[in-house]
Image (cartoon, helix red, strand yellow):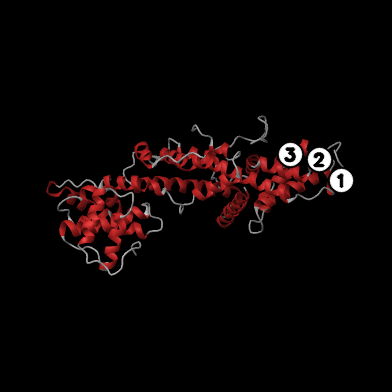
Amino acid sequence: MSEFDSAGAVFTRQPKSLAALMEGSAEQARLWRPEELGAIFRHQMSAPILVDLGGYDTAAATRLKKLSEAQSLLLKSFSDLFHHPAPPLELLELTKNFAKANMDHPASSLPNEVATTLYYASIAAALVRLDTRISRLKDADLHRGLLWTSEQPWLNEPTKQLLLQAAAKIPPPAGQGGPPS
Amino acid sequence: MSSEPAASSIFPRTDWAELGKAAEPDEARLDRLIRTYWAPLRIFLVATFPSLKDQADLLLQDFAEDKILKKGWLQRADHTRGKFRDFLKTSLRNFVLDRLSRVEFKRPPVSLDELAQEPPAAQAPSEEFDLTWVRTVLAQTLQQMEADCKNPAADQPRRGYIWEIFRIRLLEPVFNDAVPAPYEELIERFSLRSPTDASNLLLSAKRIFKAHLRRVIQQYAEQDAATAAEIQALEEFIARLAKRD
């Protein structure tokens, strides 16, 4: 058994600890602390694309493998994808859809902030690298979303610059501020 | 637990492999339930009959051994009416009164009239009974979860990691005020491939905990609806106590 006797601890701790165990074990309880978002985002950026996207859309897994290795591009991670000079459009679209599914899902295994950043980064990469728009958001909403995401304190500099460059390509809205809708 | 049955007890040691068997004979089931919930039952017995404090363990042992009680006892519990915990308390109370009325105690320490005049269990002892019951349920749940996760025969890969991540992310912080192991440490320790992988591991741990909690309660509440109601009742009770801390 482990070095910590949790079953024994149950009999000696205050009721508030027992309540915290019950609350914390709920699936809807927040998995990660806000101060961990930076580490989670960095991990996401370095994660193999196939691990997440292959699991999200198994039918696309084989195609993804070919895409990510096409023309010796060697797109192994999301960071490789976003910062490649000519990333495959289909891969960016799939990444956007994967991120959106995680943003909208109440039981998503990806923190909403990280999923949102992945979503806007894929749109930004298409805009900046391929001059192509893969989002149907209105200009104002897209601009606001790109800026809001770029302001997250845990974001790394290359992704921040990518988001700002993309925002610069969108006509600025009349009013600014607030999180993306 | 401070009031475990003696090592020489007639009750078998808990065999986790037995858990989950649906058609367990009444006799074995009663023995196991009373042994498992010995501590809260003892608290109830002493609170209800303070003058029988010294005989509490003996009476509980007799309660478990009682042949008449075993015969169809669990079937008499109407799970749609009231909690099993209350049924168990009533059964124990009636058993003690019946035992005393039959003068099986050669020299009862107090008269039946005197016993009948003892004040009914006040709120505090009842609360203490429920709290000890919750503690027992949670301890059983954690023991089973740990054994399950560490079972080398389990075919789920990385099952051992599930207990470890649950321990360092939830149990140690909750019970020992420890700082949860930082995310970066988890990546190394559990060879996590992505944040989704990490979240799935932690979510699996929570689901396994809940599954074992349900299974422990199902041992006495039986039907799914009664189990769900019991989980909710225990959660509400412990949350209410926590607010007073």
User: Dot 3 falls on which chain?
Assistant: B
Front residue of A42/B77: it is A42
Q: Name the image quarter holding the N terminus of chain B.
A: top right
- Tell me which numbered mark, 3 or 1, is placed earlier along the sequence: 3
- Whole-percent x and y of residue B161? 41, 39
**Precedes in sequence: disc 2 or disc 3:** 2
Task: Identify the chain of the residue marked 1, using the numbered disc in the image.
Answer: B
Looking at the image, the residue that sits furthest to the top is B8
Q: Mark 1 packing: few (<14 Cα in 10 Å), some, or many (20+)?
A: few
Q: Mark 2 lies on which chain?
A: B
Instruction: Identify the mark at residue B62; answer none if there is no mark.
Output: 3
Residue A56: image location, x then y, percent:
30, 54
Please determine if labels 2 and 3 lie on a single subunit.
yes
Q: What residue type is labelled 3?
A: Asp
Q: Distance between the residues labelled 2 and 3?
A: 18 Å
- Is residue B44 left or right of A29 when viewed as pictured? right
**Residue placed under numbered mark 2 in the picture:** B51
Secondary element at image label 1:
helix
Q: Examine the rendering and report whether any part of residue A78 can be seen.
A: no
Image location of residue A123, percent across then percent down: 24, 59
